[in-house]
Image: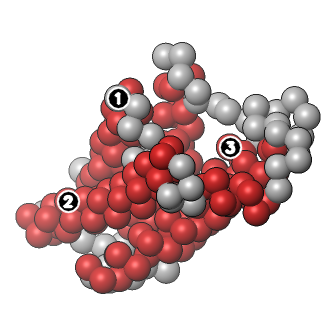
């Protein structure tokens, strides 16, 4: 097996383990604590082939959403989901600019990715609330009210989801980059090189 295949295999395995954890946390109803942002940043940063960098995060979430759907949970949930996937693509693009990841840099990218996801996904909730027949339909909901409801301390659920989202993003981002950095130390074939 050549160096590139080993590297891609390890990257995909790390992403799949993160997706599995998304399913597990959802099963225990720990909402918004997921590897969404981390997988997008990690994929964008680590795949030399940028087509794969965008493909794997989106495929991972399509597969996990399909799994949610098949077990009777809300896997595909309406108009706002298009905004969620758009946010994943934008965060992956952000990840493509993350070169030589260091602790403070990873933290900054994780917080930026979390903020982008929060802004875009809540905008999607508002768009969905304006469309009759959509799962999010809520006549009269303003964009400001949508963001207000999503702020921590507005109510218990928004506080939990906000804390879980940002905390999960930071934890998963450090886990993905950290595990991969440790793996690179023990296996030089995993090191990123522009000559690959």
* Frontmost residue, 12 versus 93: 93
The relative height of residue 149 versus residue 178 in the rendered view (above or below) is above
Q: Answer few, some or many: residues within 10 Å of disc 3's Cα (few below 14, many 20 plus, some between 14 and 19).
A: some
Q: Is residue 25 left or right of residue 133?
A: left
Q: Residue at x 74, y 57 (%)?
A: 145
* Residue 72 lies in quadrant: top right
Residue under label 3, please give it. 81
The relative height of residue 186 versus residue 55 in the rendered view (above or below) is below
Q: Is residue 22 left or right of residue 67?
A: left
Q: Is residue 84 left or right of residue 130?
A: left
Secondary structure of the residue carrying numbered label 1: loop
Residue under label 2, please give it. 179
Quarter holding the C terminus is bottom left
Q: Answer few, some or many: residues within 10 Å of disc 2's Cα (few below 14, many 20 plus, some between 14 and 19).
A: few
Q: Residue at x 35, y 75 (%)?
A: 107
Q: Position of residue 83 (x, y in %)?
A: 70, 52
Q: Is residue 120 left or right of residue 8?
A: right
Q: CA distance from mark 3 to mark 2?
A: 30 Å
* Residue 133 lies in quadrant: top right
What's the mark number on residue 118?
Answer: none
Q: What coloring was used for the rendering?
A: secondary structure
Residue under label 1, please give it. 28
Secondary structure of the residue carrying numbered label 3: helix
Q: CA distance from mark 1 to mark 2?
A: 25 Å
Q: Residue at x 30, y 49 (%)?
A: 14
Q: Residue at x 58, y 29 (%)?
A: 75
- State which mark lies toward you, 3 or 2: 3
- State which mark lies toward you, 3 or 1: 1
């Amino acid at each position: 097996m050549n160096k590139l295949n080993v590297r891609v295999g390890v990257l995909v395995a790390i992403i799949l383990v993160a997706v599995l954890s998304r399913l597990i946390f959802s099963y225990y109803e720990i909402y918004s604590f997921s590897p969404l942002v981390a997988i997008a940043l990690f994929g964008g940063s680590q795949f030399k082939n940028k087509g794969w960098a965008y493909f794997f995060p989106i495929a991972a979430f399509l597969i996990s959403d399909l799994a949610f759907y098949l077990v009777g949970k809300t896997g595909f949930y309406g108009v706002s989901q298009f905004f969620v996937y758009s946010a994943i693509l934008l965060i992956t693009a952000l990840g493509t600019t993350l070169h030589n990841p260091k602790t403070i840099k990873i933290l900054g990218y994780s917080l930026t990715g979390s903020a982008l996801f929060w802004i875009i996904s809540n905008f999607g909730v508002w768009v969905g609330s304006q469309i009759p027949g959509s799962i999010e339909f809520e006549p009269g909901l303003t964009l400001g009210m949508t963001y207000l409801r999503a702020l921590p301390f507005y109510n218990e659920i928004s506080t939990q989801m906000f804390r879980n989202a940002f905390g999960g993003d930071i934890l998963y981002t450090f886990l993905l980059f950290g595990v991969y950095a440790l793996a690179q130390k023990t296996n030089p074939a995993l090191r990123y090189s522009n000559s690959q």
